[in-house]
Image: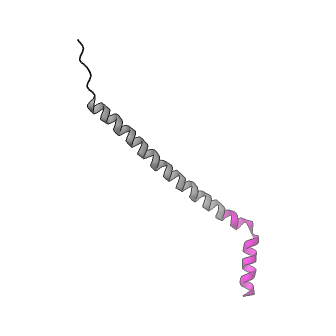
Amino acid sequence: MSAFLAGVRRFLREDEAANGVEYALLAGLIAIAFTAGAGLLGVNINTFLNGVAGYIATFNPVAPG
């Protein structure tokens, strides 16, 4: 039991392990934000281009004269 507690104390004293976990969490949050942003951007671009396509499909120029 004392060896286990000594290992836990050593783990808590080491900053490198904590930094690794923090960097992994940060990378995960960045990936989630990037995925969500790309998804929203894709939806907005799709809506815009569908509107342009609808305008072009119904465009009826007035004949001169």
Magenta stretch contains residue 51: no
The image shows residue 41 at horizontal and vertical percentages of 46, 45
Dominant SS of magenta comes to helix
Q: With 54 as the anchor, is 17 left or right in this view?
A: right
- The residue sitting at 38% across, 42% down in the picture is 47
| Residue 58 in which image quadrant | top left
Residue 54, image quadrant: top left
Where is residue 19? Give x, y as percent. 69, 63
Per the image, is 5 magenta?
A: yes
Query: Could you tell whether 30 is left or right of 57 in the image?
Result: right
Which residue appears at 25% of the width and 19% of the height?
A: 62
Q: Is residue 56 left or right of residue 24?
A: left
At a point 64% along the width and 60% down the height, the residue shown is 23
Query: Which of the two residues, 28 or 65, is positioned nearer the viewer here?
Result: 65
- Nearest the viewer among 63 and 26 is 63
Residue furthest to the top: 65
Q: Position of residue 31 (x, y in %)?
A: 54, 55
Stretch of the chain drawn in magenta: 1-20
Using the image, determine if residue 40 lies above or below residue 26.
above
Color scheme of the displayed model: one colour
> In this picture, is 35 found above or below 61?
below
